[in-house]
Amino acid sequence: MRHSTLALLPLFLAAAPGCAHADWIDPGLAYRCDAAAGEFGLAATMATSAPEMPGEVGVPAGYAPLSKEHDELAVSCGLGHAQASAAIHIIRAQRHGQCSSFEFVDLVRLQVDGKPLLEHTLFNGGCHSDPVLHRIEIRATGTALWLRTCRAPWDWATGYSPDVCEEREISSDGKAASN
């Protein structure tokens, strides 16, 4: 009896790794350009292995998902008298290292009329409890441009929360507008 049990042990060990499924997350990105309303936006999405939990973050209304098929993405939007654009780099999952099991979204550059507003900023995430940039909006109101950025940590139970947003007026040269 002892011999037959030992003979089955290799089969059990070979099958065991396939039996366990770890939870997973897949950070994504959505984009909005409404030239008529003068609005440009980027929003984080988060697909999870548990979509019934509040941590799953879908594509917001008025936004379209961006494909992560390519490592480099570029989006732009006319905002009345100005042109907003973003260059994005997808950092692929790695075999080793902290937080290596999922992709990251690097906002390489956010600019208005060629002038940078943000550069090399982690956009989206779920590895650490530190707040990450998860929403950007640029909107034109008359001759003014407004930049709104929102940061929050991501969590399985709450999604991106608590949200801390900042809004500032910008000029087309990317600097804070003077009052």
Image (tube, grey):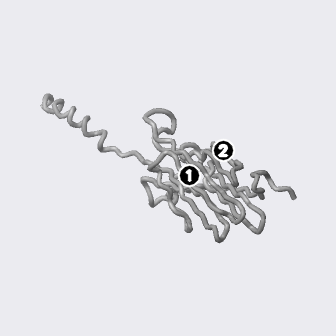
Which residue appears at 42% of the width and 48% of the height? Answer: 23
Label 2's element? strand
Label 1's element? strand
Q: Residue 171 falls in which quadrant of the image?
A: bottom right
Going by the picture, which residue comes out furthest to the right? 179
Which residue appears at 63% of the width and 52% of the height? Answer: 152
Which residue appears at 70% of the width and 58% of the height? Answer: 148
Q: Quarter holding the C terminus?
A: bottom right
75 with respect to 148 (left or right): left
Task: Name the residue type under label 1.
Answer: Ala
Q: Reply above or below: 39 against 124.
A: below
Which residue appears at 54% of the width and 45% of the height? Answer: 89
Residue 92 coordinates in the image, percent (x, y): 47, 41
Q: Nearer the viewer, residue 157 or 150?
A: 150
On the image, numbered disc 2 is attached to which residue?
A: 119
Residue 35 coordinates in the image, percent (x, y): 63, 67
Q: Reply above or below: 19 against 61.
A: above
**Mark identifier at residue 74:** 1
Q: Mark 2 packing: few (<14 Cα in 10 Å), some, or many (20+)?
A: some
Residue 47 coordinates in the image, percent (x, y): 47, 55
Residue 109 coordinates in the image, percent (x, y): 63, 47
